[in-house]
Structure formats: C-alpha cells, structure tokens
Amino acid sequence: MRRPMVAGNWKMHGSRGENARLVEELIGGLPPAASADCVVCPPFVYLQEVGRMLRDSPIALGAQDTCAEPQGAFTGEISAGMLKDIGCKYVIVGHSERRLIFRESDQLVARKFAAAHAKALIPILCVGEQLADREANRTEEVIARQLDVVLELCGPDVLGQGVVAYEPVWAIGTGRNATPQQAQDAHAFIRARIAARDARIAAETRILYGGSVKAGNAAELFAMPDVDGGLVGGASLKADEFLAIIAAAR
C-alpha cells in the first residue's frame, strides 16, 4: 500500500526567525506516529539550519531544485551530492516555475532527476499543464511528454524510486484548484502511463497533487484513489494549515 506523503515547498519565503517558529510549531503539532510522510523544502540558504532543527523529528528535509551536473565550474549551482551531504532526503525537480520562468526543458529536468537518484536523493518530479493546454484538451499530451523523457532516460525502476507530483499550472498560487475528479483523472493517466512500462512499479509509485492545496480541500482531494498526498505551496508556510493537510492525508 502506498504511504501518503505531504511535502511543503516554501519557495522564496522565510527568514531565520520565521523558519524557527514554523518548524517548532510543526514538530509540536505532529502526532507521535504520523501515518503520512512529511517533508519541508526551504530555500537553499536555510537548508542546513532547518535540517538541524528537524533532527530527530519525523519531518524530512528536501530541496527545491538541484543541478544536473555532479560538480564543476557551474557558478551559483548546487549539486545533488551537496544536498545529500547536508542532510537532504528529497529534492523537487521540474517545478512549473523552473520550467516556465527559467526555461528548463523536459530533457534538463530528466537529467536532474537522474542526478538526484545517483546521489541517493528521492526526486519529486513535477509534471502538469498550463491553462491553454487544458482548454485545448492537451493535458494528457503534455503530461505524457514530460513523463516519457524521464522514463526514457532513467527507466521505470528509477522513476518508481522517486515521487511524481501533478501540478496543473493554472491552479498554482491562483486560488483555483483542480476538482477532485480532475486531479484523479490526471493521476490515473500518469499511473497508466507508467504501467505501460511496468504495472508493479506504477501501482507502487506515489503521485502527489500540487495546485492550491489547503486545509479546506485536502481531504476531498486525498480521498481520490490515485492521489497519494500533496505538494503544498503557500499553505505550507502556516503551521496550522500544513498540519491540517497532513492530518487529511492519513
């Protein structure tokens, strides 16, 4: 059975004081034996400090991105090995903001996925369509393209050791979110796409929903059979909201 998971992407938010308060409230509010995996992904500059705060807690540390190269003359980049070295367990790759704002290609995202896996990090692969794609009935076409590049480069075995997050771009930070059935349809398509390569791996792969997940809609979304939790943006910066979402994932 797939264990539920909730990951918080802090994006470019936070300060040392704000982070300390948030982590303290999260650790204090989690039940002793949570039935869902919990991850927080702070900005790079706070990773090591937040990691120290999370030590001996049930919350895992994740990064928001990684370089596709293992090392070298890549000014400003952070390698997967460096992330592993400071205690990260997870890393997000291919977030829609990286794809759209920073023009990351499907091929680059696949290489980042492979680089993370090579250093024993668990990549969280983001896939999803823009509003124009959905309105033109190209949702499955876009998801298939983004997913297939990773499957071709890494194979289903490696993909299955990561996590997939479906994030409809039109529902990120807009206050809009996919209906539970829209989310389920996309998640079922992703699982079927992986199953075409390996049914066992498809059945075991966790697929998260990301797109304006909040306490008020989490339970409904997570009740869908192929939705295994959430990749949470703004709501992960509020301890009470994030804890309510984790509770809904049980």
Image (tube, rainbow, N blue to C red):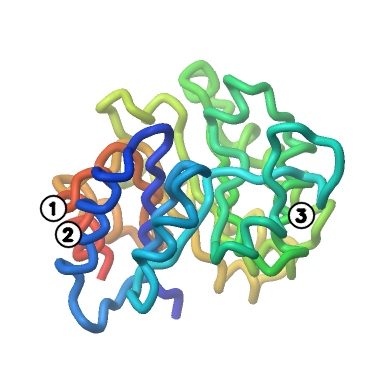
Residue type of the residue flagged with mark 1: Asp
Circle 2 packing at 10 Å, graded few (<14), some (14-19), many (20+), is: some
Distance of label 3 from label 2 (alpha carbons):
33 Å
Mark 1 lies on residue: 240
Split into 4 quadrants, where in the image is the N terminus? bottom left
Q: Looking at the image, is 168 positioned above or below residue 48?
A: above
From the viewer's perspective, is residue 82 above or below residue 213?
below
Give the amino acid at mark 3.
Ala
* Residue type, numbered disc 2: Glu
Tell me what residue is drawn at x 33 percent, y 38 percent: 14
What residue does disc 3 label?
A: 115
Residue bearing mark 2: 25
Q: Earlier in the sequence, mark 3 or mark 2?
A: 2
Pick the front one: 120 or 71:
71
Q: Earlier in the sequence, mark 1 or mark 2?
A: 2
Say which element carries label 3: helix
What whole-number distance in Å separates the C-alpha atoms at marks 1 and 3? 34 Å
The residue at 40%/49% (across/down) is 231
Task: State the residue at coordinates (46%, 39%).
Answer: 167
Task: Please rate how many residues cluster around mark 1, counting C-alpha atoms within 10 Å: few if below 14, some from 14 to 19, many from 20.
Answer: some
Q: Are marks 1 and 2 in contact (CB under 8 Å)?
A: yes
Residue 215 placement (x, y as % from top left):
17, 49
